[in-house]
Amino acid sequence: MNAAEIAAGRERWQRRYDASRKRDADFTTLSGSTVDPVYGPPADTDHPGFERIGWPGEFPYTRGLYPTGYRGRTWTIRQFAGFGNARQTNERYKMILAAGGGGLSVAFDMPTLMGRDSDEPQSLGEVGHCGVAIDTAADMEVLFDGISLQDVTTSMTISGPAVPVFCMYLVAAERQGADLSKLDGTLQTDIFKEYIAQKEWLFEPEPHLRLIGDLMEYCAAEIPKYKPLSVSGYHIREAGSTAAQELAYTLADGFGYVELGLSRGLDVNTFAPGLSFFFDAHVDFFEEIAKFRAARRIWARHLRDDYGATSEKALWLKFHTQTAGVSLTAQQPVNNVVRTAVEALAAILGGTNSLHTNALDETLALPTDESAEIALRTQQVLMEETGVVNVADPLGGSWYVEALTDRIEAEAEEIFARIRELGHDGSVTQGILRGIEDGWFTGNIAEAAFVYQQALEKNDKRVVGVNVHTGTVSKDLEILRVSHEVEVVQRRELITRKTNRDSVRVKAALERLVAVSRTGENMIPAMLDAARAEASLGEICGVLKDEWGIYREPARF
């Protein structure tokens, strides 16, 4: 790019920056020196390839979505939390919000993630242990008691039974008197990554995609601010993928959902802004920053060139980040505070829109109140004390970071090409489905994990406290333990709820849901009626399993 084009770009950025709202804050260094809101090439100089870097708030969005960076608005502090029953988790949410958290993120227990009720035999010993137990809309009411759902953004990390859980959330909001059209938040719903990495599915892929398509249509028409899909790379990375695999598989899944929306006749400019993303921030600092910058650039280009998006918001890749759980160590767990801070800083310098920081004890158990507060304060120290919010994309133009960004982008494009080859029609969706069926994704992730583990065991890769610097004076941590009484009480309350509800109404609502599933009608209204009748999660998922069958992964050796 020549000097004149660069100067014109800076002028465009300046006009947009001047017209944007800025926070009332001190944007100087600790020593009091003034810093510019963005930096670029020196005036009157050419910079070949600068069009791939550009200015904040301008295509291809390598440097961020907004001309102001974090001067306009900082990232949302969205701490992931959930344990025990809804009452206990409600208390943790209120603590997070009172301590400065900006949004909520719900962690569900394993029975809920698998679409089962707490009183099912398969749920024994798992209720409330890795998240909160949600059986009916009444649990959702308790979960958000005293928290205005109309005023707080809420993320829910669940995919297999995401749609019925979302319906219960809507019913809880109705019972608060909320205007549902004003709800804001994110539902994960990403079933592709379940087959690729996490394994929490219910049905074959096609019925899941039917439900997701219905949800996309419903939210676009009725709840325009709510994001019905959070395309998740986090679990892909936690399963052992490389950074480039995480990026490519996640964006490919996103392209698949774009193709789903288009197949429903939806306008890409209307539904694409409702797609958000969820990435892992691992411990290799610069590689992670490059990954986030490349993600925005790739998404914007493909949405424009391949899928015909024309509106700016349809080209935006908005993403939430969580620090890497897989990087945490049981050995010398206090070191995890450092790892989490480095990973969080990488996410921030990469331009994340919201962030969860893991607690130091999460490799051992769910966080205690104290460790949860330390995780929250980690974000607040970075936000309030370090000056990282003062300049948009401060590493933009770094030879190393730009080279890494280009390299990860090129690796991702090679993977996209391979996925398209897998499909019989050249679409990303068919390539993903074939890759799932053939074990292509899981095989590649397993190989990457094996290569890393070999390097770790040979000491080529080093982890403090594990294979280097293993001596310590630290003591064992006090960890959070979920009492068995939680399961006993949850099961008892669910049985009482089922006994006291209008069973005729429940039966009719479930029959209506099955009838709608046999048509081309949108299933969300019928599922909402079932949730209003206090049909349980296990009952709703159960009648659909009877109708659609369940998915079992083929054995591979």
Image: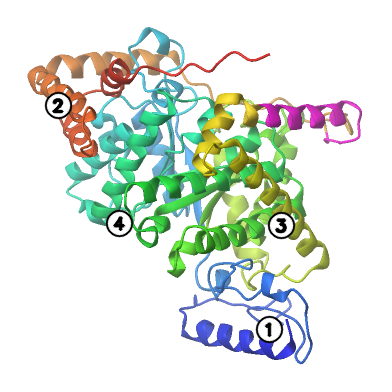
Tell me the kind of residue under disc 2. Answer: Arg
Residue 512: which numbered mark, if any?
Answer: 2
Q: Does dot 4 land on a helix, a strand or a loop?
A: loop
The residue sitting at 59% across, 51% down in the picture is 377
Vertical comparison of 392 with 108: above or below: below
Regarding residue 356, the answer to whether it shows in the image is no
Q: Who comes first in sequence, dot 1 or dot 2?
A: 1
Q: CA distance from mark 1 to mark 3?
A: 27 Å
Tell me the kind of residue under disc 3. Answer: Ala
Give the mark toward the camera: 4 or 2.
2
The residue sitting at 53% across, 53% down in the picture is 319
Count up the numbered dots. Answer: 4
The residue sitting at 24% across, 38% down in the picture is 524
Q: Does dot 1 land on a helix, a strand or a loop?
A: loop
Q: Which residue is mark 1?
A: 34
Foreground pick, 257 / 533: 257
Q: CA distance from mark 1 to mark 4?
A: 40 Å
Task: Estimate how packed mark 2 is, as few (under 14), some (14 to 19) or many (20 or more) residues with alpha carbons within 10 Å.
Answer: some
Magenta region, residue range:
443-464
Give the mark toward the camera: 3 or 2.
2
Q: CA distance from mark 1 to mark 2?
A: 64 Å
Q: Which residue is mark 3?
A: 290
Vertical comparison of 503 with 271: above or below: above
Measured from the top left, where is residue 504 in percent x and y? 8, 18
Q: Which residue is mark 4?
A: 224
Foreground pick, 292 / 422: 422
